Amino acid sequence: MNRQHAAWGFLAPALLVLGIFFLLPVIAAFGLSLTDYDLYALADIRHLRFVALHNYWDLLHQPKFWSALGHTFYFVVVGVPLSILVSLGAALLLNSPWVRGKTFFRTALFAPVVTTVVAVAVVWRYIFNTKYGLLNYVLGLVGIHPVDWLGDPHWAMPAIILFAVWKNFGYNMIILLAGLQAIPGDLYEAARIDGASVVQQFRHITLPMLRPTLLMVAILTVSGYFQLFAEPYVMTEGGPLQSTTSVLYLMYNEGFKWWNFGTASAVAFLLFVIMFAVTGLMLRVGRRGEAA
């Protein structure tokens, strides 16, 4: 057996697992999106009909799809920069030589990531409570009237964003902290000798050296935030007035509430196309930044 055949022999088990558990379901879902697979077809497969691209065409003419897409983009555009800023700030603090108890704070800040959404949602629903919530109590101390965070369509999505950022920023913080610790200390030492301030060190050393890590974190966060589902599901159930219904939540409703599996699969593939395009654009912009 030559080396090429031996390499394929080692790769074969992994490729087989990927084919069965990833590629095959994707192909099956795409096939479903080209049919009118619904509750009737679920009871009797003879009711299944091939409709080609009708599900995609129908979705693109439905206001609820564009509304869900708008809510998702709102969540991504506001939530991703906020999440990265909080993550970067926490990573910089934990990387500072003057901070004590780093192990404790690293564990405490990462704890929300591994805590189930349902469990922490109970606490955050209390924090957002209009009458007894901690957030409104703090706002009341500075003379701001209570806000119906989860019942007002204008405030529901910001509340979801706040909750999601708190829940997920620890994951990015760990990645950014690893990136910060990989920057050679000699660069900072030389900059201090040259009289560079902390802000100048951050601008001319930290940010350029951290750029590949930031790009990876941005892509991971964008991909994750496009799949917004758990937070509105446990906090607002897509309301009020569907103001927190995301594309993935719409897919869930179509598939598991209305039993329109064909339409739900089409929603999933449209979301995949959007995520693929946004990720490709981010990679292109990132490579141009590195080349400049």
Image (spheres, rainbow, N blue to C red):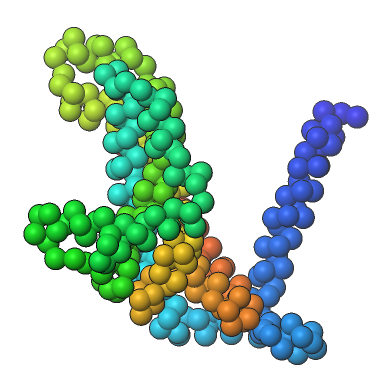
Residue 4 located left or right of residue 223: right
Q: In the image, 18: left or right of 142?
A: right
* Residue 40, x across and y down, in percent: 71, 89
Left or right of residue 13, residue 260 in this image:
left
Q: Is residue 72 above or below residue 188?
A: below
Q: Which residue is at the far left?
A: 143
Residue 285 visible in the current orientation? no
Q: Nearer the viewer, residue 123 or 72?
A: 123
Q: Looking at the image, is 290 positioned above or below residue 268?
A: above
- Name which residue lies at 50% across and 74% down: 250
Give 257 or 34, whichever is nearer the viewer: 257
Pick the quarter of the image with the C terminus: top left
Q: Quadrant of the N terminus?
A: top right
Taking the spot 54% from the left edge, 72% from the top edge, the residue there is: 251
Q: Position of residue 239 (x, y in %)?
A: 39, 75
Tell me where residue 111 sits by quadrant. top left
Occupied quadrant, residue 30: bottom right
Of residues 94 and 101, the one nearer the viewer is: 101
Q: Is residue 192 above or below residue 250?
A: above
Residue depicted at x 32% and y 68%: 150
